[in-house]
Amino acid sequence: MGKPDNPEVYAGAVVMALMAYPPEIVTQATDPRRGIQSTSKFLPSIAELMEACERRMTPLCVRWGEIKKMKEDHEVFPQPDVQERERMKDKFSKLINDLQYGSIDNR
C-alpha cells in the first residue's frame, strides 16, 4: 500500500468518514482479513472506504426496516383501557377457576 500525499489530511478524512457509521460496520470494513485491505492493493481512497462501509450497512438497514415494520404493526392494536383490562382479568380468573374445579362442560 502506498502513502498519501498528506498523511494528516488523509487520516482526518478517514476519521470523519468512519464517524458516520456504527462501530461494528467500521470494524468489519477495516478488518485486515475481510475488510477493504483484503481487496485493495493500494491505500484506499475515502470514497472506496465509504463504499466498503455502505456495502456492510445494507443488511443492517434491511434488518432495521424489518424491526421498524414490526413495531408499527404492533402499534396497530391499541392497548386496552383500564375497564377492558379488568373485564379480561375477571374472565381469565373465571376460566382458571373452571379449569381447576372442572365446571366446564366437556361436550
Image (tube, rainbow, N blue to C red):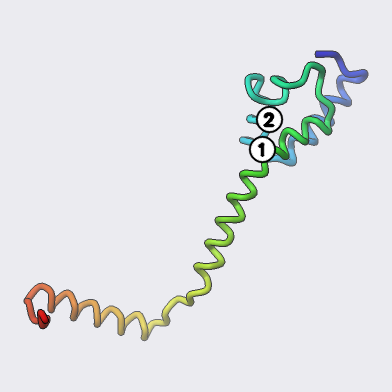
Q: Position of residue 43 (x, y in %)?
A: 81, 19
Compared to 71, does 87 lie above or below?
Answer: below
Taking the image as shown, residue 107 lies to the left or right of residue 44, namely left
Determine whether the residue tagged by mark 1 lies in a helix, strand or loop. Answer: helix
The image quarter containing residue 56 is: top right
Choose the circle earlier in sequence order: 2 or 1. 2
In whole angstroms, how far apart are the C-alphas of marks 2 and 1?
A: 7 Å
Q: Are marks 2 and 1 in contact (CB under 8 Å)?
A: yes
Q: Position of residue 11 (x, y in %)?
A: 82, 25
Amino acid at the residue labelled 1: Arg
| Picture residue at 65% right of the left edge, 36% below the top | 25
| Picture residue at 70% right of the left edge, 40% below the top | 21
Taking the image as shown, residue 104 lies to the left or right of residue 29, namely left
Taking the image as shown, residue 107 lies to the left or right of residue 16, namely left
Mark 2 lies on residue: 29
**Which residue occupies the foreground of this view, 80 or 74?**
74
Q: Residues within 10 Å of mark 1 (few under 14, many from 20)?
A: some
**Which residue occupies the foreground of this view, 63 or 100?**
63
* Residue with the most extreme top position: 2
Mark 1 lies on residue: 56
Amino acid at the residue labelled 2: Ala
